[in-house]
Image (tube, rainbow, N blue to C red):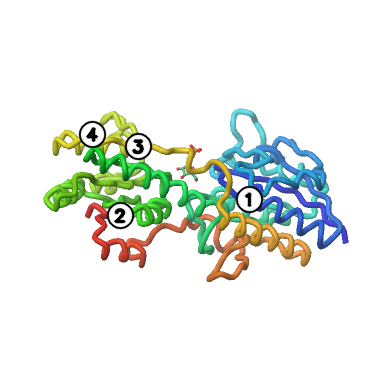
Amino acid sequence: MKRRIGILTAGGDCPGLNAAIRGVARAAYEMFDTEIVGIADGYRGLIEGEWQEMKRSQFSGILTLGGTILGTSRTPFRNMRVIEDDNVDKVSAMKKNYAAMKLDCLVTLGGNGTHKTANLLSEEGMNVIGLPKTIDNDIYGTDFTFGFHTAVDIATEVIDRIHTTAASHGRVMVIEIMGNKAGWLTLYSGLAGGADVVLLPEIPYDIKEVIKCVETRAKNKKSFTIIAVAEGAMDKKEAKMKRKEREAARQEEGFSGIANRLAKQLSAEMGVEARAVMPGHVQRGGTPSAYDRVLSTQFGVHAAQLIAKEEYGYTVALSGNIITHNKLSEIAGIPKLVPPDHQMVQVARDMGISFGI
Ligand code: F6P
């Protein structure tokens, strides 16, 4: 049995992509006669026909490497069926290039958008297998995505380092953690780093409650406060607005990120020294943690096992410590957000952490 496998990585990068690519490749080479085609920069390479035959040696030495050896890009799902100014029919182009590469199957490593397009390609008759990656951990049907734990480790280290300087100066430090729609990364790193306030996109905050928390700490002789805020957090008023309306209101306000806004508000309204910290893409860079290396490898090998059985139209998942797979059609397009009554939220509340409500 010979299998010709196309691999692409799409969407924002994260640690563990190369470990997962290596997992797919090594297991495939071990299990069956394999040829691998590397597609450049995610769906862009599939649309534009940019790909290369990979050698087995190219999958060596990449376990610990951050980023992706294949390159990545964001090709929004909402535009996949739209013919834009370049006049390219993207779906037809992808089908044509899949056939030109003579693929038996396509492995797509990515987040929510990537999975929606993977499902579309599967519906269009391609043999597709997805692998769930993202530091946001917001893919439905899997307990964890790879990349998430490494980002939690990095964000926690940021909070730890900020903690000591906050305590020395008696400052309020507002740390902006990545996550536009999902607050998992902020929740985990906030709990791990001992943040006093955790603000998530899923739980709109009231600035008065945040102020109350800083005041209560000051009364209790705590000279500093650590606030972990997800980049997509919003206040209660904003949460009632439609997206466009919120964007317009923020433009008028001169909004330059949620951490900056909070630091300014706290300084102005309380007279405290408040500073914003934005670790940004540091959270997505560098070598994957041991946990993510193991998870990525397990996911990659599971994909190869599915290919061996010619079982397509699935994405690999972790469910209660078991590596399994879900139908692409059943998970694509469903974001996994933090339920406001999630057990971890309750744990944090019981620890006295404020969610700003
Ligand atoms: O999806 C991962 C993520 O890092 C989000 O947390 C963040 O909102 C977004 O990507 C940033 O995207 P970009 O790197 O394209 O600015």
Separation of marks 1 and 2 at Cα, in angstroms: 30 Å
Left or right? Give the position of 111 relative to 97: left
Front-most of residues 102 and 267: 267
At label 1, the amino acid type is: Leu
Separation of marks 3 and 4 at Cα, in angstroms: 12 Å
At label 3, the amino acid type is: Val
Looking at the image, tell me whether mark 2 or mark 3 is earlier in sequence order: 2
Looking at the image, tell me whether mark 3 or mark 4 is earlier in sequence order: 4
The residue that appears at 64% across and 42% down in the rendered structure is 68
Q: Residues within 10 Å of mark 3 (few under 14, many from 20)?
A: some
What secondary structure is found at the residue carrying circle 1?
strand
Residue of label 2: 203
Q: Does any atom of ligand 1 lie closer than 8 Å to the CB of label 2?
A: no
- What number of labels is visible? 4
Residue of label 1: 109
Q: Nearer the viewer, mark 3 or mark 1?
A: 3
Q: Residues within 10 Å of mark 4 (few under 14, many from 20)?
A: some
Separation of marks 2 and 3 at Cα, in angstroms: 21 Å
The residue that appears at 56% across and 42% down in the rendered structure is 286
Separation of marks 3 and 1 at Cα, in angstroms: 30 Å
Residue of label 4: 264
Q: Nearer the viewer, mark 2 or mark 4?
A: 4
Left or right? Give the position of 176 relative to 22: left
Looking at the image, tell me whether mark 3 or mark 1 is earlier in sequence order: 1
Residue of label 3: 277
At label 2, the amino acid type is: Ile
Rendering coords of residue 229 (x, y %): 33, 46
